[in-house]
């Protein structure tokens, strides 16, 4: 539909109303789309600003906005941590205020350069954090279309220290390569030598120019199966350690020890050489010496035991195996104190001597023990402490046969002993007999004198003494037959102490008894055992001239009754202890020495033993062991 518009009386043809409306609607739609686009663009710009701000605040590195003079305009939270200040104490101040003095001037120079040329700068500076130096890298760039800069600060302490470490390692490597006492050679895959240090030049008897024109394989003396196997193993495991004979250009042969590692330095292979020709010669000599010493050690007649500071057995020779009746493999690692059985007595035990040793000391003596648990064997021993590197040595020489031979010789001298006994008895009898003769003569001259009673008294005393000596001698010469019965040892001891109580009071001696087991029965001849107890306790009372104490203790072991009689007298030396029990040896003024000899004989007849311990100024202790089982089968 068209219509006409009259202007100045003229009719003008135009568009219809509907078309005009549609055009207006299209324009309106376009405007609305443009407005929506602008709103979205603005929203996106705000979102972008938020993201930028969030990234600015959340960045792990410190970020600063500076003006052209270096004054801080904005920072993120990391900067507060870096500079150890609150945000309001940082913003508005120049960045040089927070840097070390020597870096402040450098920072101003960089800012001037960037203002002039848009230059991007980066440098390193340290800060002190609790006396610890922390290194930071600062990277600054000029802001586009603005009069200012953005700077990023990053903690690079670990990278910086690693860099320093690498630099030191390179210096150390260079020093090691140049100054090393061992020869170091770098070579290519084809075998050509690329570099070598001074030590390598001396080992290969070559100049640097001569060595770098050769291959390592040129110096191998024999390229035999060992050499071929070595090469295969090297390329299989990438490294090896070997010894080979090398031939030098001057014709000299050298045994070299070397270590090779493939691709060890910038793709090159490295070999480190050491001349061991002299060491090899010394090792041969040492092996020969060691072989000789081992032969001497193993073939020695004396048993030799090597032990450490904890007394653990480290080594022993064949003779020691024979003595101890056990193989070396079984003994190694065991304590020597546990392996060696207890001695027959304290005076004949090796263990106290071992325990008393100090650094560098040695001791020796006699050791009597039942190695097989039955028969006594006697050894001469010598202990030496810490002879080498914490190791000590004990040597044992079996002298059992010698001891037995000495005993046989002693027994074979019975006639001589009887002669000595006869001489002793004659001497002991002569004095009382002289007195008897004298008094008899007086009685003959003065038969009716009132003094005859005193003379008869003296005669009786001396005759009793003669009888006692003769009886003891006859008991030793021909022991009488005895019958063994089961009897309580505690009862025998009680009777003994009661019998000697009066004499003890007279000598101001206190007697104490300790019975760990009661009753304690053994097979014995009670009167004979009482004689032993009386003799030993009586001797103890007599040696306590100024009074003292005698302690009697009864105990038991698995097989024996153990009687201990101890006094606190003056004691005697170890040398005199070994003589106790010998005929006519006594420490008493009027003793004969036969009493203790009789005691030992009685206990031996009971298949027991007597051990004596004494120490000067301390006292003397008698240990009597009597088997608990019947000894009838032994007769």
Image (cartoon, rainbow, N blue to C red):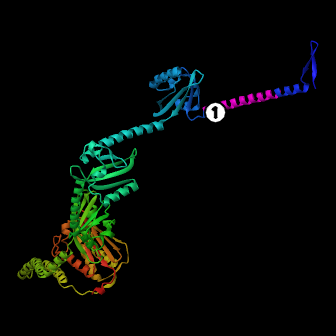
Magenta residues, dominant SS class = helix
Q: Position of residue 146 (x, y in %)?
A: 59, 22
Q: Position of residue 80 (x, y in %)?
A: 56, 30
Residue 36 vs 172, above or below: the answer is: above
Q: Quadrant of the C terminus?
A: bottom left
Residue 266 vs 615, above or below: the answer is: above
Q: Nearer the viewer, residue 246 or 316?
A: 246
Q: Quadrant of the N terminus?
A: top right
The answer to whether residue 424 is left or right of residue 147 is left
The answer to whether residue 314 is left or right of residue 442 is right
Residue ID at (30%, 66%): 336
Q: Nearer the viewer, residue 572 or 633?
A: 633
Q: Position of residue 624 (x, y in %)?
A: 28, 75
The answer to whether residue 169 is left or right of residue 455 is right
- Secondary structure of residue under mark 1: helix
Residue 146 vs 350, above or below: the answer is: above
Residue ID at (89%, 23%): 15
Q: Is residue 512 visible?
A: no
Q: Is residue 576 visible?
A: yes
The answer to whether residue 448 is left or right of residue 179 is left
> Mark 1 sits on what residue?
54
Residue 67 vs 165, above or below: the answer is: above
Task: Tell me which segment is drawn in magenta.
Answer: 28-56
Q: How many marks?
A: 1
> Which residue is the extreme one toward the top?
8
Residue ID at (51%, 34%): 155
Q: Quadrant of residue 544?
A: bottom left
Q: Is residue 595 magenta?
A: no
Q: Is residue 43 magenta?
A: yes
Crowd class of label 1 (few under 14; some 14 to 19; many from 20; radius 10 Å): few
């Amino acid at each position: 539909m068209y219509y006409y518009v009259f202007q100045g009386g003229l009719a003008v043809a135009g568009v219809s109303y509907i078309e005009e409306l549609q055009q207006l609607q299209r324009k309106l739609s376009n405007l609305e789309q443009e407005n929506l686009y602008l709103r979205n663009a603005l929203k996106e710009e705000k979102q972008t600003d938020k993201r930028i701000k969030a990234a600015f605040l959340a960045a792990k590195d410190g970020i600063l906005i500076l003006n052209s003079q270096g004054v801080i305009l904005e920072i993120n939270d990391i900067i507060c941590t870096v500079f150890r200040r609150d945000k309001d104490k940082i913003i508005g101040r120049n960045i040089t205020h927070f840097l070390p003095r020597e870096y402040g001037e450098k920072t101003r120079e960089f800012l001037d350069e960037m203002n002039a040329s848009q230059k991007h700068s980066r440098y390193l500076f340290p800060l002190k954090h609790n006396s610890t130096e922390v290194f930071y890298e600062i990277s600054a760039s000029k802001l586009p279309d603005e009069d200012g800069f953005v700077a990023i600060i990053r903690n690079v302490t670990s990278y910086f220290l690693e860099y320093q470490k690498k630099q030191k390692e390179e210096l150390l490597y260079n020093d090691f390569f140049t100054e090393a006492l061992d020869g170091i050679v770098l070579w290519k895959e084809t075998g050509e030598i690329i570099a070598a240090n001074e030590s390598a030049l001396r080992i290969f008897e070559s100049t640097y120019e001569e060595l770098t024109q050769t291959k390592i394989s040129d110096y191998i003396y024999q390229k035999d199966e060992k050499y071929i196997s070595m090469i295969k193993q090297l390329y299989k495991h990438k490294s090896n350690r070997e010894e080979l004979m090398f031939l030098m250009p001057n014709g000299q042969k050298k045994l070299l020890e070397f270590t090779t590692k493939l691709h060890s330095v910038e793709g090159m292979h490295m070999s480190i050489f050491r001349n061991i020709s002299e060491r090899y010669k010394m090792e041969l000599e040492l092996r020969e010496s060691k072989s000789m010493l081992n032969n001497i050690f193993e073939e020695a007649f004396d048993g030799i035991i090597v032990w450490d500071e904890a007394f653990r057995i480290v080594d022993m020779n064949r003779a020691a195996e024979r003595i101890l009746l056990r193989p070396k493999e079984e003994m190694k690692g065991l304590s020597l104190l546990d392996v060696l059985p207890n001695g027959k007595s304290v005076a004949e035990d090796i263990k106290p001597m071992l325990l008393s040793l100090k650094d560098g000391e040695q001791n020796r003596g006699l050791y009597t023990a039942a190695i097989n648990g039955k028969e006594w064997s006697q050894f001469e021993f010598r202990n030496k402490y810490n002879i080498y590197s914490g190791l000590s040595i004990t040597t044992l020489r079996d002298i059992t046969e010698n001891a037995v031979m000495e005993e046989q010789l002693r027994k074979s001298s019975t006639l001589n002993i009887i002669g000595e006994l006869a001489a002793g008895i004659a001497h002991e009898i002569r004095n009382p007999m002289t007195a008897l003769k004298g008094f008899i003569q007086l009685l003959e001259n003065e038969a009716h004198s009132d003094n005859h009673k005193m003379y008869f008294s003296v005669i009786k005393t001396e005759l009793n003494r003669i009888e006692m000596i003769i009886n003891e001698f006859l008991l030793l010469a021909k022991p009488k037959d005895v019958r063994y019965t089961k009897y309580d040892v505690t009862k025998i001891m009680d009777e003994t102490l009661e019998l000697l109580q009066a004499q003890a009071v007279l000598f101001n001696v206190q007697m104490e008894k300790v019975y760990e087991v009661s009753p304690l029965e053994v097979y014995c001849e009670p009167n004979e055992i009482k004689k032993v107890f009386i003799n030993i306790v009586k001797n103890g009372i007599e040696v306590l001239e100024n009074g003292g104490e005698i302690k009697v203790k009864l105990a038991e072991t698995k097989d024996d009754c153990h009687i201990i009689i101890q006094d606190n007298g003056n004691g005697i030396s170890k040398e005199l202890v070994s003589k106790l029990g010998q005929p006519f040896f006594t420490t008493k003024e009027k003793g004969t020495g036969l009493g203790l000899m009789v005691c030992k004989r009685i206990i031996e007849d009971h298949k027991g033993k007597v051990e004596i311990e004494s120490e000067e100024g301390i006292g003397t202790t008698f240990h009597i062991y009597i088997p608990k089982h019947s000894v009838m089968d032994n007769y």
